[in-house]
Image (tube, rainbow, N blue to C red):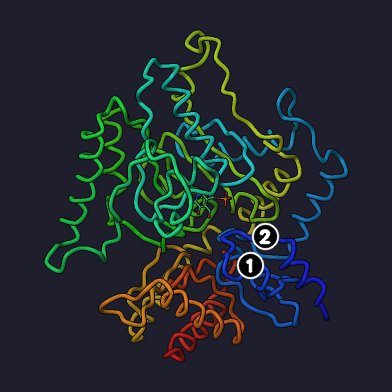
Amino acid sequence: MDNTNSKNWDNDHFMHPWEGMDDIGQNDRAFIEASDGVYVTNDAGQKMLDGPAGMWCVQVGYGRDEIANAMAEQARQLAYFSPFNNTNSVATEFAREIAKRTPGDLNHVFFTTGGSTAVDTALRFVHFRNNLLGKPTKKKIISRQKAYHGSTYLAAAVSGKERDRLWLDKPDELAHFLPNVNPILRAPDQSIEEFLDEKIADLENAILELGPENVAAFIAEPVLASGGVIVPPIGYHKRCIEVCHRHDVLYISDEVVTAFGRLGHWFASYDVFGIQPDIITCAKGLTSGYAPMGAAIFSDRLIADISGSDGKGATFSNGYTYSGHPVSAAAGLASMQIIEREGILEHVQTITPHFQERLQNLSNLPLVVDARGMGLMGCIECSYDPDHGSSLARDYELGANIDAKCQENGLVLRPIINMCVMSPPLVISPDQIDQMFDVLEDAIGSVD
Ligand SMILES: Cc1ncc(COP(=O)(O)O)c(C=O)c1O
């Protein structure tokens, strides 16, 4: 297909996320034009396995008529109406179905337009609640280095990927960042248990230094996703929530990536890590990426102590034109039904050991610094100089070289600088897992 025009239009008019200013207007991005199952097809007609499931989101795979039909029917019946003073039955049903699957009393679903707005909503609610409770100073949010919580001003302010912040401002007074929880960073003579103790002490010391009367919440991804699939030591989450609750600090579990099956469960907080957060944020897999939607989910307890006679006549003045969008809700419900009917959570649990084994096998390659993952999330961190690290430019170059080789051989990868991150559609088969890792292994092996 000759798409010279489209390429020009893309360069002239479509400003992309993380747009590089050096080469803006001169890019040669591949056009992805078609899809089926775990595969996408580019404009040259090449079919490629989708390693990152779009952007950690296409849980049930591509080309699902059932979702497309549900969306089309909903658009015909009621494409949109304002959620501010009215409601609609599809979003209501979806909220109920989500609440049935959340841990404990997380029953209040605030629909948003994506993950960033879900995080924004959670943070604004925490501040709102403390104002109502007469704790106006309790506003600081504790986050972690390498965390990614989104691109709105507030969500970016609690995101800790320093390379994303080189040229952008943030409100310094809002967030406090704890050191990286990646166990590979521990000293050679430090045991994993000692490292865990240190990370828990980091949290408690931060709360004490800032003053519990000033700290509102701790926000954490169960597994840090865009930061490079960082899996904290076993027991980390449970001990963190104990510290938080000891100091009246709320625990926000950012499950934008981990919810809806990525770790083999609807939500990972309780089923994988045994914790009952005060707030969960989610998006992406909520609709399998078929339509934009996110949610901040609040516990009954958080609502109870600021509502009714304790509500002081206040309004939580936060919301979006598209909160509870009927077409997105229809997509979400259909995706949820597929996950349930096809036993996709059980499938993820069954294939995870194979995925993780293939991932670990790559750690023997010379360029590989670390191979880590959990569930259907994996990261291969590479370096031209594994012992001494490399410059940012060299890291970008290495990631791009591996990516190019993978694309040539039919695998879409999404390098985060020098980290090859994989989070395929959850319906991937063991053979397709092999195909993915075979291509990646060849690609890493062929780069010198
Ligand atoms: C953990 C986490 N939170 C929030 C976000 C932001 O979501 P969105 O891009 O839908 O705004 C992301 C996006 O990758 C994420 O990984």
Seen from the viewer's position, the closer of residues 244 and 176 is 176
**Which residue ends up furthest to the front in the rendered image?**
22
Instruction: Please tell me how many numbered marks the rendered image carries.
Output: 2
Q: Is residue 343 visible?
A: no
Q: Is residue 99 above or below residue 288?
A: above
Can you identify the residue that label 1 sits on?
24
**Which quadrant would the N terminus be assigned to in this image?**
bottom right
Q: Is residue 230 above or below residue 119?
A: below
Q: Is residue 252 visible?
A: yes
Does residue 355 appear left or right of residue 176 in this picture? right
**At 25% across and 35% down in the image, what residue appears?**
207
**Which residue ends up furthest to the left in the rendered image?**
189
Tag 2: Cα neighbours inside 10 Å, few (<14), some, or many (≥20)? Answer: few
Determine whether the residue tagged by mark 1 lies in a helix, strand or loop.
Answer: loop
Mark 1 is on which residue type? Ile
Q: Quadrant of residue 64?
A: bottom right
Q: Is residue 45 above or below residue 263?
A: below
**At 57% across and 69% down in the image, what residue appears?**
22
Mark 2 or mark 1, which is nearer to you?
Answer: 1
**At 52% across and 85% down in the image, what residue appears?**
439
Q: Position of residue 146 (x, y in %)?
A: 38, 56
